[in-house]
Amino acid sequence: MPGFKFQLQRSGETTWFAVAVAQVTPVEITVIPLEAGKPERIYIRAMLLKNNDPTPAPHAISFR
């Protein structure tokens, strides 16, 4: 069954970690800041899954 895997990377870091897996959209993802009340930049990427296997390269979107 097709689905999506969402990963997050914080600005200045090199590691991506999974934050959600979904089979329908929209998907709501809550990210708690490292320091309360301070803004931070994060990167989110989504991978299309087919039979739980990633299809080609993830797509990155930047939010502030």
Image: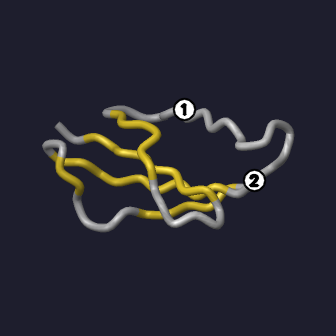
Which residue occupies 86% across, 39% down?
Answer: 37
Badge nearest the viewer, 1 or 2: 2
Q: Is residue 31 left or right of residue 20?
A: right
Q: Is residue 62 above or below residue 21?
A: below
Mark 1 neighbour density, 10 Å: few (under 14) some (14–19) many (20 or more): few
Q: Is residue 47 left or right of residue 7?
A: left
Q: Is residue 4 above or below residue 24?
A: below
**Residue picked out by circle 1:** 28
**Residue picked out by circle 2:** 40
Locate the N terminus by quadrant.
Answer: top left
Location of residue 35 by image quarter:
top right
Of helix, strand and loop, which one carries label 1? Answer: loop
Of helix, strand and loop, which one carries label 2? Answer: loop
Q: Is residue 30 above or below residue 8?
A: above
Which residue occupies 62% across, 61% down?
Answer: 62
Residue 22 coordinates in the image, percent (x, y): 36, 34
Q: Earlier in the sequence, mark 1 or mark 2?
A: 1
Q: Which label was assigned to residue 2?
A: none
What's under tag 2, amino acid-wise?
A: Glu
Location of residue 28 by image quarter:
top right
Mark 2 neighbour density, 10 Å: few (under 14) some (14–19) many (20 or more): few
